[in-house]
Image (tube, rainbow, N blue to C red):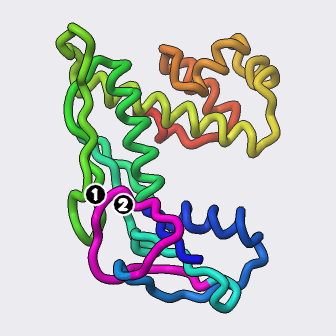
Amino acid sequence: MKAIFVTEKEAREFINNNFGQDAILKDCEVSDSERFDIDEVPYQWGGSTFAYEVNNGEAYVGFMEEPGAVYSAVFCGVSELAFSLYEAREIADRMKDVAEDCNVAGVISIRSKGEGEIDTVEVGIFDDEEPEGAASDFVKAWKKLEIGAAIKEARSAQSISIRELAQLTGMSKNNIVRIEAGLYNYTIDNLVEILSALKMDLDIIP
């Protein structure tokens, strides 16, 4: 069997699902001249690319992205690193959702450290409505998401429940949930209370 995917993550998932996590893998290459039983690459490509030989030749599973490559998704001056093309595209999708919520138009750039810009995602196609949001609106909303995710991660790592954090800060459980989701317009005092309760670095405050 021969299969080809865009990302290494997709290739790994295919191997795990079809051959188990104990499959024997060996690095190799596959050529575009091969006949693939499963071809999940949505574009033409040339030459050879990375692959795993599975169980001493039982299957060859290729993927297009370079192992260990560094990617980024960039929009409105915000640049987020990713260590796979799959992850970079996921970040770009989240950026698109946030931008559209903020009514911000533009183009998200997906970049590779070695190749520069490799793809773009257009943002700002609204039904009968001109985008009126500013880049600063997107940046603020994205920062709130980052802060919320960091708070949730720190709380979980310390095994502190939402109820306990609410008691420590004098805030409601509902507001804690909304802050972690990046949806609450908290004050600096609210944020300092939470960061202090979790013993987090205050440098997170923009």
Circle 1 sits on which residue? 111
Left or right relative to 139: residue 122 = left
In the rendered image, the residue lying farthest to the bottom is 56
In the rendered image, the residue lying farthest to the top is 128
Disc 2 marks which amino acid? Answer: Tyr
Instruction: Evaluate if marks 2 and 1 touch, with contact meaning CB atoms under 8 Å apart.
Output: yes
Does 57 lie within the magenta span? Answer: no
Q: Does residue 83 appear in this view? A: no
Residue 71 is tagged as: 2
Q: Earlier in the sequence, mark 2 or mark 1?
A: 2
Residue neighbourhood size for the residue with mark 2, other residues' Cα within 10 Å, grouped as few (<14), some (14–19), many (≥20): many
Does 38 lie within the magenta span? Answer: yes
Q: 43 or 138, which is in the foreground?
A: 43
Left or right relative to 6: residue 130 = left
Residue at x 50%, y 80% (from the top left corner): 51
Please give the range of residues in magenta.
34-53
